[in-house]
Every structure is written in structure tokens, then in C-alpha cells.
Image (cartoon, helix red, strand yellow):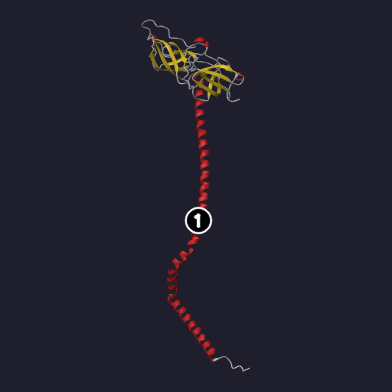
Amino acid sequence: MPPYAGPSTSSRSGEVADTLRLLAYLGLAIVLIVLDHRGGWLRMAREQASLVVQPIRAVAGWPSRMAGMLYEDAGTLAQLTEENARLRNQLLVDSARLARLQAVAADNVRLRALLGAKQRGNLDVLLAPILDVDLDPTRQRLVLDAGRGDGVRVGQSVIDSGGLVGQVIEASPIQATVLLLTDPSHVVPVAVARNGVRLMAYGNGRSDMLSLTNIPLSSEIKVGDLLVTSGLGSRFPAGFPVGTVAELRPDDSRAFLSGDVTPAAQLDRGRDVLLLRSAPAAPLPSAPPLPSGADTPAPSGGQPGEGAGHEVTGATLRAGDGVGR
């Protein structure tokens, strides 16, 4: 075995070169540090390098940003869909509430009108809700949520805020049936409020019209005249509006007139009616013939109880009469 002779010459030269290289790097680093500290050259170099690297960094970050945007958009879309569904449901609920409030407001207006009709005539009446309506051309009826237990009786007159509606023809313990003025089998004695001429108004199966027949040519009736109940036959109290003359025409014989009457009552609408508990004591008087030169009598009014020139008396409407069961 040969004796150890130490490192070779080539190895020592390589170590020296590495040491010199390291010293050169250190010297260069020290020089660069000093120059950067005094002039900021390295900082400017870094900024320039950053400008070159920035597009590469942006391109490399696109996938992550796109994934984040898609995730955020998906969450936003789900949130907006849920919010849209909630708002749609809320809109439906609010629309239903608004419709209900409008219906209640309309009912309030009708009830105020009924109360006004009662107060104007100082009438003793029963407020009765309408349960059913039958407006068949051959059968005009109302079914009321009030019966004999509430004091309803057969033959009782029925009115609303406009005028006469009809009369009770059937009464059970809890319900009553009303025959409307427009029923083909119904006839009501009327008088012209302006001059007291007596006529007969017939139902014809139409909820918006009554008929007049056999009107004398000398009756001086005119289109627009108000017709009120005359009180004849003791079926209906005198002075309640029945309708307004809408048209007059000669009949086939040319000896009389026939006409159409628009009902004063709202026969095809409304949810409540009034039943008269008591009636005026005296019928509506006719206009007697006047001697020559006499003054024309003052026209009678068309409001309930005013056709005879006197007031209809009666008890006040008690709260809750005939409303519900």
C-alpha cells in the first residue's frame, strides 16, 4: 500500500478557484448593495422586471379567478332566484289582500248607503245578508240569511238604498225567499211622483228593466219620471222608489202607450237588503183633478216616506239585526 501523499495538485487548484469565485461574488454583492443603497439601481431593476413578469402572473391567475367568479355568480344566481320567488309570493299575497280590502271598502259603501236610506226615512228595518241569487229569466229570486226567528214574515217588503226590491214569499226559521220586482209573475202598483198618475209596473224577467202597459195617452207621463209605490192593495207601503221611465212608445192599438222602466234598486248586485218591519200608515195620495184656474199642486218627492208629504216613523235599526247567524 503506497503511503498517503496528500491532496492532488488539481484538487487544490479547484478549491482555490472556488474560493476566488466566492470572494468575487461577495465583492460584487457588496458593490451592488452599496450602489443600490446610494442610487436605488436595483430597485429600478426590480420594478422593470416586475413589469415584465406581471402579464405572466396575470395569465397564470386566470383559472383561479375564473373559478372564483363562477362560484360567486352561481351563489348570486341562486340567491336572486330565491329572492325572486319570495317576492312573487309576496306580490300574490299583497294582491289578494288588496282585492279583499277593495271588496271590504265596496261593502262598506253599500252598507253606508243602506244606513242612509234607513235614516232618511226613519224606518224600522231589518238588515239581512243575501245568501243566494236566482236571476233566471223565468224566476227572479233572492235567498236571505234571515227567517222567522229574526222576525221575517211572508209579504214583508224588501228595499235597498235605491228603492223597492220585492217582497218575501217564503220564510223558514232561518232563511227567507224574496220575489223580485222583475219576476215575470210580479206586478207592483206605482204612481208617477210628479203628478200622482197611477200605473202598474210588470216584471219581464230582466234584472235591469220593468214594463208599463196600457198607459192612457192623457196621463202626461214623460221619460225620466220617477215611479214610486202607490200603496194600493196594501202590499207595499207608499212612497218607495220603484224606477225611472226610460222609454215610451205607442202600443199596437195606438190607443195606449207602453214603456220601459229602469229599476231604482240594484237588483243584480249588493250583498245585503233591508226588510221593512213596519209600514207607513197612509198610502200615497193621487193628484185630484183641479178646477180651472187652480194652481198646480207641488210635486211629491221620490224618497221613501215622502211621497205622501209626511214622515215614515219607526224604531231605529238595532246593531246586529239580521247580520249573520
Residue positioned most to the front: 1
Rendering coords of residue 151 (x, y %) = 60, 18
Q: Say whether residue 149 is left or right of residue 61.
A: right
- Note whether 319 is above or below 35 in the view shown: above
Rendering coords of residue 168 (x, y %) = 55, 17
**Which quadrant holds residue 169?**
top right
Q: Is residue 300 visible?
A: no
Q: Check disc 1: other Cα within 10 Å, few if <14, some if 14-19, many if 20+.
A: few
In the rendered view of the protein, which quadrant contains the C terminus? top right
**Which quadrant holds residue 36?**
bottom left
Rendering coords of residue 268 (x, y %) = 49, 23
> Along the line of sight, which residue is nearer the eye, 213 or 242?
213
Residue positioned most to the left: 293
- Note whether 198 is above or below 77 in the view shown: above
Residue positioned most to the top: 291
Secondary structure beneath label 1? helix
**Which residue is rendered at x = 51% and y = 55% of the image?**
72
- Note whether 153 is above or below 19 in the view shown: above
Task: Identify which amino acid the numbered label 1 is placed on.
Answer: Leu
Rendering coords of residue 145 (x, y %) = 58, 23
Residue at which label 1 appears: 70
Q: Is residue 91 visible?
A: yes
> Along the line of sight, which residue is nearer the eye, 49 or 320?
49
Q: Say whether residue 97 is left or right of residue 38.
A: right
**Which quadrant holds residue 7?**
bottom right
**Which residue is rendered at x = 52% and y = 11% of the image?**
234
**Which residue is rendered at x = 52% and y = 36% of the image?**
96
